[in-house]
Amino acid sequence: MSEHRRKPPQPQGGGRAAARRGQSGSSPGRRAAPRGATGSPSDSYGSDSYDSGGEERQYGGRAEARRAAQRSTGGSRRRAAEPGRGGRRAAPGGPNGPGRGRGRAAAVPDKKRLIDYPRAGKYGWQRWMPSWKLVSGLCIAFFGSLVAVAGIGYAMVGVPNEENAAASSQNNVYYWADGTQMVAAGSGQNRQNVPLAKIPKAMQWAVISAENKSFYDDSGVDPMGIARALANMARGGDTQGGSTITQQFVKNTYLSQEQTVTRKFKEMFISIKVGTKLSKDEILQGYLNTSYYGRGAYGIQAAAQAYYGKEAKDLKPSECAFLAALLKGPTYYDPAGNESIDQNASKDKNTKRSKDRWAWILEQMHNDKRITDEQYQEAIKKYPMPDERKASKGMTGQIGYLADTAKKYVLNHSNISEKQFDLGGYQIKTTFDKEKVEALAKAVKKVEKEKLDPENRELDKHVQFGAASVKPNDGAIVALYGGAGYENGHFNNNADTAGVPVGSTWKPFVLAAAMEHGTYRSKGPLSPLSKYNGNDHLKVRNNDGSYVLKKDNTPFFQENESNYPWGYISLRKAMEQSVNTPFVQLGMDVGMKNVADVAEKAGILDSSFAGLNASFALGTSTPSAIRMADAYATFAAAGKQAAPYSVTSVKSNGQEVEGFDPPRVTRAMPEQVANNVTDVLENVIQNGTGQKALALGRTAAGKTGTTDENKSAWFVGYTQQLSTSVAMFREDPKSARLLSMNGTAGEKSIHGGDVPTLVWTEYMKAALKGENDPGFPEAEKIGDIQDELGAPTPKPTPSVEPSETVTESPSPTPTESSSPSPSPSNTCGFFGCEDDGGAQNGGTDNGGTDGGVSPEPTPSDTNPDGGTSRGNGNGNGNGGIFGGPEG
């Protein structure tokens, strides 16, 4: 700390030299006075400081001088002018006296700032509290800027002279895999303007009551609605809703459908201008003629024809309310359903939504005094169910299903909405091979003609087929069969349908899970030569040894299709003859969650899974034909999986749309697991229920599947080049309920090894014509043999003639089927030959047919394996190719 000493006053004259001389005469070690201490006008750091007694205060260097200068600002300025306040005061002597060095505050007068913030002369929180002048000034500036921007925007944005694509829709063009054109389809020729005079008043008021009650009174713009849309847009949510009829008309007619801030502001300014140039009736007419009603129909005239087959002028009030409800979103309000776009858009759900909104619109019209009490009672009496969908030009045969599949893929792999897509202008290149598509349709028609006679056999009516063919190691869908065609009133795509259980074609996933994860008793993978009890009517055990129970707490018994006494047979033999009981118990031992995980990794969507109870192992799930072909393609590709896809590129206005690169190929299961499944499925064709596929004349693997009461029958098979699935089922056209196929085709029962296998073989012959036969990779031995708990211990084979262990006499006449008769003959595979011994060769026994699915036990508590149920538990999961998280 500097020592402060008093010294005699310095003479006022003499300037700097005198000051320096005076300082030089001071005692040694005394520091020179800071600049300004002399009173010279040339000093620049601030001022000397004099106390009330006129004594000079000296500072300890520049830093202290600066701090002193800072303390002299603000409130110190006032105190400097008031003697006795402890601050500075002006020195006497006038402008030339000692006071000239009184400090920075006195030397530099206050400057007025444009924005006084932080506030001068204030301390603490007051220094940071803006003044009312500042706040009001900023508010005026902000709102003034908004007005200026709005004025500039209004002046710069004009009403376009031409209508946009929405008002003059185009077609979409689909191409085959080789680049040739498949079909040009869309709404390009499905729009016709009609004057307002030809649109019923009920239709006009239905739209106003539902969409914009203040239409005839408002300015055409809803600022709060725009603000909500912008806020939703910022959050990434739905930006629709809140727009007036004028705004909707502007968007339909002049703007794109993109959801951006720029488009929203354009919409607002154009709507204001349109509101000043057009009458309300002209705007309403334009809105009704440009709105999208679904089924490719733009405008009220096209909608009236698409849904009711009549002119717009002939619509009844009830029908008008129905069409007005479609404006909420035709995908979800068309009673015909649109599950190809979204599984949530089923017929039942859409019908319920439509009825609810239809009734609400009629109620609003009645409340708004737009229809009389009598008209309301008449309109609300009966829901006006629309006509079924009709095939548009070019969408006949399988083309409609191919375009439907490609459209669904596009919507699920891009930001394109259905409404945008239906405006047209897209070029879609698909994976579909024209020759293979024709070969698959031809195969179905040939077998139908040979086996079915709906004209003369009642049980042959309402039989349907669905099929798909996929490239292993790639995922490209090269062919599919969706049904009889749009022109025949069949609009559901059977290749991508939901609700048809796959039956025993599910068993390979159970075996794959056992070979990958083992069972709760094994220390590792399980060999397919492990033996399980194949007898009929067996109780199923949980891992703790307790029995699986039904809802009434009685034991659940698993049935086979026949009561043939197989005894303990290997899993390989059980797969060959499609015996149920071994796979149900195996599924319990492995854990149904592990089975589900293996199936999902192979390519099955979990949304199609049934409940993970005992019957899950027998195919109560309902994946589509596309997904089953793709999952078996994983076995064909030695465990590599690629999601199915149907589109390779999409262009709009000459520009490539992103998102259509081929799916990535991943490892779904160990190679040796997949190859061992293939080896077992080869044996199914060579010696088991799939022997009719031997007519293919080349190396193939596959599995038959039949469900309870023969309500569906499947065959899924593959070579290294192609994996193909074929489904056959009967469906009640009114309720969409599956019907039994017992008696169909003149047979006592239909199995997967019958008609579906014939269709598969016929198609694969044509599809693989000219291709080589590479066979399959050799399967390496996998896992240990671990027989089911309770299985007898194997005994050494005596050197003399082997004796057959004969069980109590089998049923003399087990259920007949076209499946091959079991025999005690050896079954040979890469493990060598095995003698399953349990097959009795007596009489006309044909033993293990393609086992049907027994009713689910529905355990009262949690899943038998302790896992969490991933399905709906009723066997009616959704099985679409793009349903749920995918697309």
Image: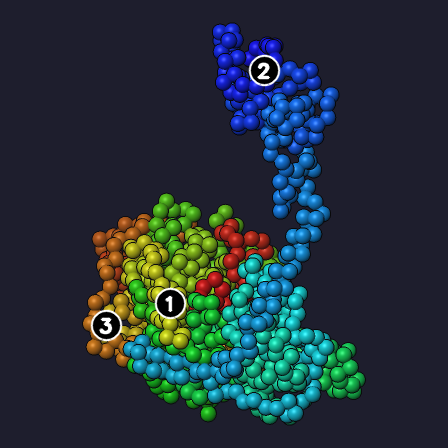
Q: Is residue 801 visible?
A: no
Q: Earlier in the sequence, mark 3 or mark 1?
A: 1
- Of the residues shown, which amino acid type is indicated by label 3? Arg
Please tell me whether residue 122 is drawn above or below residue 350 in the rendered image: above
> In front: 340, or 546?
340
Across and down, in percent, residue 325 comes to 63, 78
User: Where on the picture, by quarter, is residue 565?
Assistant: bottom left
Q: Few, some or many C-alpha atoms within 10 Å of disc 3 (few <14, some 14-19, many ≥20)?
A: some
Across and down, in percent, residue 598 comes to 40, 57
Q: Which mark is residue 660?
A: 1
Q: Few, some or many C-alpha atoms within 10 Å of disc 2 (few <14, some 14-19, many ≥20)?
A: few
Residue visible at 70% across and 75% down? 218
Q: Is residue 161 visible?
A: yes
Residue visible at 24% across and 69% down? 699
Q: Few, some or many C-alpha atoms within 10 Å of disc 1 (few <14, some 14-19, many ≥20)?
A: some
Asked which secondary structure carries label 3, the reply is: loop
Please tell me whether residue 256 is drawn above or below residue 456 in the rendered image: above
Q: Gap in Å between the C-alphas at discs 1 and 2? A: 94 Å
Across and down, in percent, residue 68 comes to 59, 24
Please tell me whether residue 806 is drawn above or below residue 270 in the rendered image: above
Residue visible at 25% across and 62% down? 828
> In front: 858, or 107?
107
Q: Gap in Å between the C-alphas at discs 3 and 1? A: 34 Å
